[in-house]
Image: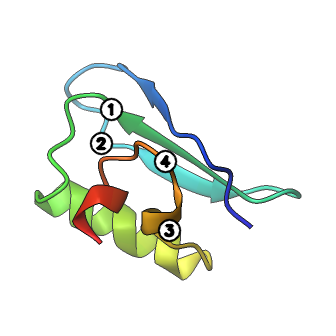
Amino acid sequence: MLQQDVLTVDYGPAFHGTALKTDTGIVCVIPRQLDPRSKAGNVLRELVQGLGGNCGQCNGCPLGSQD
């Protein structure tokens, strides 16, 4: 279900990331500076899990490195 790559972008300090389900899987957009152990990291991980995903499956994803 998940793609195997992560897209990292910088939308400024107010952007904490997002994840959404598409017809072909889940798309996650996370800021490069995100600390995966932070509250925002935990919230994004829970969001992905709520969509049926597993952060540990995406290569190079900082969220997955904490699984």
Q: Are marks 2 and 1 in contact (CB under 8 Å)?
A: yes
What residue is shown at x 79% (from left), y 55% (from top)?
22
Label 4: which residue? 59
Give amino acid for label 1.
Pro
Label 2: which residue? 16
In the foreground, 15 or 63: 63
Point out which mark residue 48 bears.
3
Q: CA distance from mark 3 to mark 4?
A: 15 Å
Compared with residue 10, is residue 30 higher up or lower down, i.e. above or below? below
Tell me if mark 1 has few (under 14), some (14-19) or many (20+) residues whose alpha carbon lies within 10 angstroms of its own.
some
Q: CA distance from mark 1 to mark 4?
A: 16 Å
Q: Are marks 2 and 3 in contact (CB under 8 Å)?
A: no
Q: Are marks 3 and 4 in contact (CB under 8 Å)?
A: no
Q: Are marks 3 and 1 in contact (CB under 8 Å)?
A: no
Label 1: which residue? 31
Viewer-nearest of labels 2 and 1?
1
Q: CA distance from mark 2 to mark 3?
A: 14 Å
Compared with residue 51, is residue 30 higher up or lower down, i.e. above or below? above
Sequence order check: which comes first, mark 3 or mark 1?
Answer: 1
Considering the image in quadrants, where does the C terminus appear?
Answer: bottom left
What residue is shown at x 50% (from left), y 68% (from top)?
48
What residue is shown at x 24% (from left), y 57% (from top)?
41
In the foreground, 10 or 57: 57
